[in-house]
Amino acid sequence: MKKILLFSLLITSLYSDAKVYMGVGAGYMNETFSDTASTTNTAEMGKLKIGYGVREAYAIEFSFDYLKNDANVFSTTGKDSDKFGMNVELVKAFDWDIFINPYFKAGFGAGYFDINHAEASSLNYGSFNLGLGFFVPVNEHLDIEVGYDYKYVSYEKLTDSNGNILVDVDSHLNGAYVGLNVRF
């Protein structure tokens, strides 16, 4: 009975201060592929997110990413298209009574992009995400976010009609961004 009461009090305290927030961010990313040519892609990225939590404690975020793609890893003619993805991340922030609130986060994601190849017109990918950064509170409802994201990206294998693997790569994506969050 004591455990149920304690758990109920913890849940109540978590939800009493939590708020829904939305944010946008923009920055640059550098992606290094594991193929033999050591292909890299450095380009712009954008992020739209919605979350629920406390700026100084815990939150869960759902984000939609846009990654400009200047690499040609999977396409036989032209470039691979820009990437679109969705991520789910748990955020742990700290209130150290200083001007900023540092945080770290971890989660996973998935996405897709189009390619120009005889065997497939699009590919999917999954990612494991880690990040860190800080919030700069402007007021109770607005904050500026500066962050760094690392993603280990695993791409769908590109195979021919006989099942032979044509392309099997993964990548390491590093991104830095600045964003603005509005809390309700």
Image: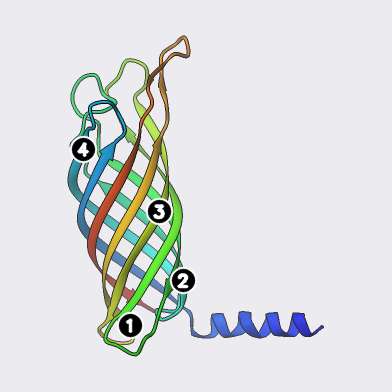
Residue occupying the point 74% across, 85% down: 5
Name the residue type under label 4.
Thr
CA–CA distance in space, label 2 to label 1: 15 Å
| Label 1 with label 3: CB-CB less than 8 Å | no
Give the SS element for disc 2: strand
* Rendered position, 53 above or below 42: below
Q: Is residue 147 above or below residue 77?
A: below
Looking at the rendered structure, the secondary structure element under dot 3 is strand
What is the CA distance from the residue labelled 1 to the residue labelled 3?
Answer: 27 Å
Residue under pointer 1: 141
Q: Nearer the viewer, mark 1 or mark 3?
A: 3
Q: Is residue 174 left or right of residue 13?
A: left
**Residue type, numbered disc 1:** His
Q: Secondary structure at mark 1?
A: loop
Say which mark, if any, is on residue 156: none
Label 4, label 1: how far apart the Cα atoms are: 38 Å
Indicate which disc, 3 or 4, sits on the residue closer to the N terminus: 4
Q: Which residue is mark 2?
A: 59
Give the mark, 4 or 2, whose residue is nearer the N terminus: 4
Q: Which residue is mark 3?
A: 129
Which quadrant of the figure has residue 159? Answer: top left
Task: Report the residue marked by disc 4.
Answer: 40
Q: Nearer the viewer, mark 4 or mark 2?
A: 4
Which residue appears at 39% of the width and 57% of the height? 130
Q: Which one is closest to the eye, mark 2 or mark 1?
A: 2
Q: Quadrant of the N terminus?
A: bottom right
Question: Does the residue at mark 4 contact the one at mark 2 (Cβ under 8 Å)?
Answer: no
Residue closest to the eye, 174 or 77: 174
The residue lying furthest to the bottom in this view is 97
